[in-house]
Image (spheres, grey):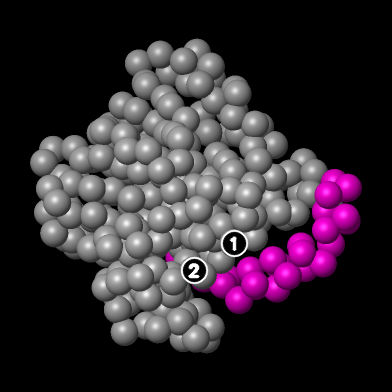
């Protein structure tokens, strides 16, 4: 298998000629970010959504128009699509503990929690001059976001193909009562939501114990509500605390072998 990061939480996985798109998002609130190749992404065999937040699901209609034929998302996500005029004919409901195949890739779903923003992160937005200088834009982002609330339907995704496993978290949190698989060949871990992510992610890494970890969701995808996360402590933190674990920070639109 191999994987490509499109920015924010958007991924493209490929194995045995099958391509699966994860959480496609156009980053339309920040046009300075690299553009998503919609035609390439839309040609995937299916899309799987970790949770139906605005930055993981709201742009799915653009990828359907580009040729995407199949979407797996929670019932709550399908309801959001109906309410917001997004076609649902290609959508298939999924929930925790599901197991299905897309071509030669097997997909398993696990229940997770959504990351809770800490006070420092909230204050960094509320008291930032940028927030108030672009207040109107922030209000527009929030108005769009409230159209796509969660209903306890955040999922982690495990992709398996020919002995390789990729574990994708849509948000940086786990559920204490869920037993997760360990030792994935690659863990994709969102690096957003807390003031000190390099420390916050360490319990997650201990629980999942992947062979390799890459981060995503660290870009400034919907300013002024978001900001680019400083990733300089990520690699040293993994090297120090998990010396047997490889870690890397992906570059947008580049393939990485798993």
Mark 1, residue position: 28
The image quarter in which residue 210 lies:
top left
Location of residue 51 with respect to 78 vertically, above or below: above
Residue 75 located left or right of residue 202? left
Crowd band around label 2 with a 10 angstrom C-alpha radius: few (<14), some (14–19), many (20+): some
Location of residue 215 with respect to 72 vertically, above or below: above
Location of residue 77 with respect to 124 vertically, above or below: below
Is 23 inside the magenta-drawn segment?
no
Relative depth, front residue between 198 and 232: 232
The image quarter in which residue 223 lies:
bottom right
Which sits earlier in the primary sequence, circle 1 or circle 2? Answer: 1
Measuring 59% from the left and 44% from the top, which residue is drawn there?
219
The picture places residue 86, in percent across and down from the top left corner, at 45, 82
Residue 59 numbered tag: 2
Measuring 53% from the left and 83% from the top, which residue is drawn there?
84
Is 152 inside the magenta-drawn segment?
yes
The picture places residue 218, in percent across and down from the top left corner, at 57, 41
Measuring 64% from the left and 37% from the top, which residue is drawn there?
229
The picture places residue 169, in percent across and down from the top left corner, at 42, 47
Residue 3 located left or right of residue 188? left
Relative depth, front residue between 232 and 244: 232
Let me know if residue 146 appears in the view. yes
**In this picture, which residue range is highlighted in magenta?**
127-155
Residue 79 located left or right of residue 44? right
Dividing the image into 4 quarters, which one contains the C terminus? top left
Residue 54 located left or right of residue 21? right
Measuring 65% from the left and 41% from the top, which residue is drawn there?
228
**Could you tell me if the residues under marks 1 and 2 are in contact, i.e. CB atoms within 8 Å?**
yes
């Amino acid at each position: 298998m191999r994987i490509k990061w499109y920015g924010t939480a958007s991924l493209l996985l490929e194995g045995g000629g099958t391509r699966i798109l994860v959480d496609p998002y156009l980053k339309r609130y920040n046009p300075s970010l690299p553009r998503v190749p919609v035609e390439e992404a839309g040609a995937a065999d299916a899309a799987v959504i970790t949770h139906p937040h605005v930055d993981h699901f709201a742009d799915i209609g653009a990828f359907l128009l580009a040729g995407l034929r199949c979407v797996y998302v929670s019932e709550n996500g399908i309801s959001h699509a109906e309410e917001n005029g997004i076609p649902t004919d290609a959508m298939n409901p999924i929930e925790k503990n599901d197991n299905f195949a897309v071509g030669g890739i097997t997909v398993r779903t696990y229940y997770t929690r959504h990351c809770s923003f800490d006070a420092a992160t909230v204050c960094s937005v509320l008291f930032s001059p940028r927030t108030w200088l672009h207040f109107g834009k922030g209000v527009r982002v929030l108005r769009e976001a409230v159209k796509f609330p969660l209903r306890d339907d955040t999922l982690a995704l495990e992709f398996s193909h020919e002995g390789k496993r990729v574990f994708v978290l849509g948000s940086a949190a786990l559920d204490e009562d869920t037993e997760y698989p360990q030792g994935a060949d690659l863990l994709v871990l969102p690096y957003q939501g807390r003031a000190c992510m390099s420390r916050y992610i360490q319990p997650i890494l201990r629980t999942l114990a992947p062979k390799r970890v890459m981060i995503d969701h660290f870009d400034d995808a919907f300013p002024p509500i978001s900001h680019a996360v400083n990733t300089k402590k990520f690699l040293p933190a993994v090297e120090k605390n998990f010396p047997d674990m490889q870690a890397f920070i992906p570059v947008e639109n580049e393939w990485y072998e798993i």
